[in-house]
Image (cartoon, rainbow, N blue to C red):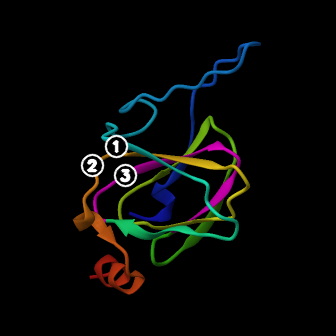
Amino acid sequence: MSIEDCRIVELPKIHDPRGNLTFIEGGSHVPFDIQRVYYLYDVPGGAERGGHAHKGLSQLIIAMSGSFDVIIDDGKDKKRIHLNRSYVGLYVCPMIWRELDNFSSGSVCMVLASNRYSEDDYYRDYGEFMRARWA
């Protein structure tokens, strides 16, 4: 997998004068069945999140409120993506190192994941990730 396999996913946006609606269906809008949903909020100014890669987990990362940056890194190339719309997500495939930073005040980051939590699925050390990536 490379950062070229990661991509922006436009989600359906139903316009309504009472407020817009967006929905997400696993296997349709995201290329996996959703097994877990979690969200980050109250992130202090200047803080970073992420700093890991997953061996087999896929994710869709969405800025539900506010904005933040996602840095994706496949060990060869790096890319910074700014997320600031609740109807746009970033699909991140397995074996991609990711970091999140530049959180705006009041931002909420929702993550849809292809698997339940398993510590065994993580690379938390960049050197270990690089060794596995190019083994």
Q: Residue at x 38, y 63 (%)?
A: 1
Say which element carries label 3.
loop
Residue at the spot of label 2? 116
Q: Residue at x 37, y 52 (%)?
A: 58
Residue 77 appears at what percent x and percent y? 54, 74
> In the image, which is nearer the foreground, mark 1 or mark 3?
1
In the rendered structure, does residue 68 fall within the stretch colored magenta? yes
- Which quadrant would residue 46 be assigned to in this image? bottom right
The three-letter code of the residue at mark 1 reads Arg
Mark linked to residue 4: none
Q: Nearer the viewer, residue 3 or 110?
A: 110
Left or right placement of residue 120 versus residue 86 in this view: left
- Which quadrant would residue 74 be assigned to in this image? bottom left
Q: Residue at x 31, y 68 (%)?
A: 122
Q: Nearer the viewer, residue 122 or 13?
A: 122
The three-letter code of the residue at mark 3 reads Ser
Q: Earlier in the sequence, mark 1 or mark 2?
A: 1
Left or right placement of residue 28 versus residue 66 in this view: left
The vertical placement of 73 against 7, above or below, is below
Q: Residue at x 45, y 77 (%)?
A: 75
Question: Magenta segment range?
Answer: 55-72
Callout 2: few (<14), some (14-19), or many (20+) C-alpha neighbours within 10 Å? few
Separation (CA) of disc 2 from disc 3 = 11 Å
> In the image, which is nearer the foreground, mark 2 or mark 3?
2
Residue at the spot of label 1? 36
Residue at the spot of label 3? 58
Residue 39 appears at what percent x and percent y? 49, 48
* Magenta span main SS: strand
Left or right placement of residue 35 versus residue 75 in this view: left
